[in-house]
Amino acid sequence: SAFANDPTTFIALPDPDKRANLAPIIAYDLKLEILSGGKVYATSPECEGVACWHKSGIKTTWANKLRAGLLRLPSYGGAHYLRFSSEEGRFYERLRKQYAPKHYMYLALLGVDPKHQGKGHASKLIRHMLCHADKQNLPCYVETQNARNINMYANFGFKLLASTHFPEG
């Protein structure tokens, strides 16, 4: 539900029937992150919030994509979603190559259930990894699709490196 009203969700899944399948699409992303060596953290067993982090250089293989459920994605999101997510992935990869340092921790996904927002769950999910990254002397990198998140990330020490739009325009 953290992404149900996200502007990117409406672009990626313009069909309301397909938007209803957001949970299994996010589940695919979480599984793929774990299978590819990333770390997925939840605030509690009730999962008020979730964050996915990984070190730079992580590669997703076709085998991991298949194990995570790639073949079910067309039925969940449709052809438009598959094209959009592929283009979006390439777009953000270009940004990371341009703006991220050589080695870093990447916050790939952060979501807090709207009914639990404002209760410190995002802070808990972010601070944990920031402490871990500091111990390893690794900077952290994040992209956000929502301008309203910029101040939140700035409160954790993230600096805005660029502002752009995807899809173009």
Image (cartoon, helix red, strand yellow):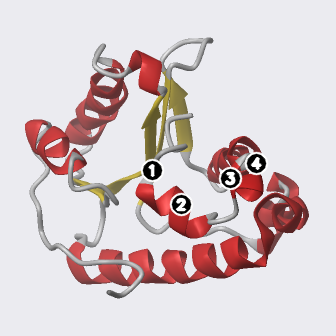
The residue under the point 49% across, 26% down is: 113
User: Which quadrant, please, contains the C terminus?
Assistant: bottom left
The residue under the point 14% across, 50% down is: 158
Residue 150, position as x, y percentages in the image: 17, 50
**Viewer-proximal residue, 146 or 38?**
146
Tell me, for residue 10, which label it has, or none. 2
> Measured along the vertical axis of the image, is residue 165 above or below residue 134?
below
Kindly check if marks 2 and 1 are in contact, taking CB atoms under 8 A apart as contact: yes
Kindly check if marks 2 and 3 are in contact, taking CB atoms under 8 A apart as contact: yes
Front: mark 4 or 2: 2
What is the spatial separation of the Cα atoms under label 4 and label 3, in whole angstroms? 5 Å
Tag count:
4
Mark 4 residue element: loop
What is the spatial separation of the Cα atoms under label 3 and label 1, in whole angstroms? 11 Å
What is the spatial separation of the Cα atoms under label 4 and label 2, in whole angstroms? 12 Å
Mark 3 residue element: helix
Kind of residue at badge 2: Phe
Disc 4 target residue:
21
